[in-house]
């Protein structure tokens, strides 16, 4: 009996230690970035911060897509579980940042950096799950500044993409509404993963149109589909969106001069992505929208995903990212 107790005690101790090491989810908003830098590399940090804070979405009032907090390496422990962490590293400085960078990089990237080559590396789940960590490193301070100057737009674009992709993964692993995707597939032949909080609000008998909603603030995802798999250009896609919004959304319009877009890929299919501002003169309301028009030749179908937000007076980019992540779960020809 005594031996059993000893064994149980050891097992419980191991279990407690294991629980202490369990990786927790990254906390906070996907818009938050902790930027780790030394005082000597402040110029590179300021340049990257400027790029990260530039406009990325069409919203009624200017918002910073990423809110950057510059910190020293000694403060990193307090930010281990932030959604986004960037480490700027000048190898010639040595010190704690270089040690942390070497721990994060794999063997190949360490060899590249040791051989005098700058590296820009994206990692996920380094300290917390659903987290993005970016390492920007170069052999010298001047090399680091040059790397940031050349790569900061690409880093900003990639971090935006990875922020949305982390949300896609979270929906599929943690937050998807049970059973709803199967219900959609069985009824319509396409698929979306929707996180908790969205409801199937309405569908129309006379046209193929489904509407999902989430309140506070109101977010609406319209899905339309048509026979045929034509790939439209931007101008034609905008005109189609105008027509459908007027007829199906109680006379919604696109605000003049507040629309942009271009070619995209969604669900592995060619698409046109539009973003802009909508308005409704009848109700004196409006807000941002994102629209995807997707060609699916494998099932001879074209789908239109319309992501519409009404959130006056509050920051809106986080909600647009959420809906963008939902759009990226689209399967045009689901079985």
Image: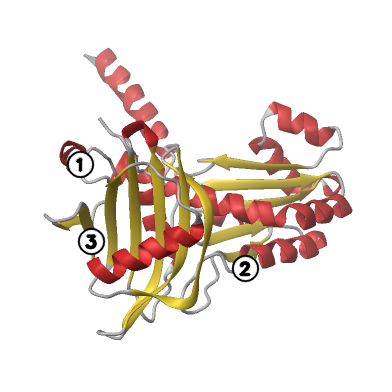
Q: Locate residue 83 relative to residue 189 in the image: left or right.
A: right
Q: Earlier in the sequence, mark 1 or mark 3?
A: 1
Between disc 1 and disc 3, the foreground one is 1
Expressed as whole percent of the image width and height from the top left, the position of residue 187 reads: 15, 41
* Residue in the image at 39% along x and 66% along y: 289
Circle 3: is it few (<14), some (14-19), or many (20+) Cα within 10 Å? some
Q: Earlier in the sequence, mark 2 or mark 1?
A: 2
Expressed as whole percent of the image width and height from the top left, the position of residue 42 reads: 77, 64
* Disc ID at residue 213: 3
Quadrant location, the N terminus: top left
Distance from the alpha carbon under mark 2 to that under mark 1? 39 Å
Q: Locate residue 34 relative to residue 305 in the image: left or right.
A: right
* Disc ID at residue 188: 1
* Residue in the image at 57% along x and 59% along y: 33
| Residue at the far left in the pictured view | 205
* Residue in the image at 40% along x and 43% along y: 295
Q: Secondary structure at mark 2?
A: loop
């Amino acid at each position: 009996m005594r031996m059993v107790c000893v064994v149980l005690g050891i097992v419980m101790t191991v279990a407690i230690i294991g629980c202490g090491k369990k990786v927790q989810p990254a906390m906070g908003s996907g818009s938050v970035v902790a930027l780790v830098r030394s005082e000597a590399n402040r110029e590179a940090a300021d340049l990257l911060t400027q790029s990260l804070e530039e406009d990325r979405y069409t919203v009624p009032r200017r918002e910073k897509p990423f809110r950057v907090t510059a910190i020293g390496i000694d403060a990193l422990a307090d930010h281990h579980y932030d959604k986004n962490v960037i480490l700027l590293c000048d190898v010639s400085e040595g010190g704690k940042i270089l040690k942390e960078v070497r721990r994060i990089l794999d063997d190949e990237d360490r060899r590249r950096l040791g051989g005098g080559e700058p590296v820009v590396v994206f990692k996920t789940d380094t300290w917390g799950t659903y987290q993005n960590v970016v390492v920007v490193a170069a052999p010298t301070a001047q090399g680091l500044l040059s790397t940031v100057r050349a790569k900061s737009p690409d880093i900003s674009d990639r971090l935006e993409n990875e922020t949305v992709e982390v949300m896609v993964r979270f929906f599929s692993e943690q937050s998807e509404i049970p059973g709803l995707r199967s219900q959609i597939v069985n009824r319509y032949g396409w698929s979306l993963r929707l996180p908790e909080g969205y409801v199937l609000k309405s569908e129309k008998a006379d046209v193929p149109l489904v509407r999902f909603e989430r309140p506070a603030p109101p977010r609406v995802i319209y899905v339309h589909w048509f026979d045929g798999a034509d790939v439209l250009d931007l101008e034609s896609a905008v005109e189609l969106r105008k027509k459908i919004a007027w007829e199906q959304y109680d006379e919604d319009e696109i605000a003049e001069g507040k629309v942009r877009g271009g070619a995209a890929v969604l669900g592995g299919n060619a698409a046109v992505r539009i973003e802009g501002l909508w308005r409704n003169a009848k109700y004196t309301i409006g807000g941002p929208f994102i629209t995807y028009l997707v060609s699916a030749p494998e099932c001879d179908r074209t789908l239109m995903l319309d992501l519409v937000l009404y959130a006056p007076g509050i920051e809106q980019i986080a909600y647009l990212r959420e809906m963008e992540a939902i759009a990226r779960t689209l399967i045009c020809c689901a079985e």
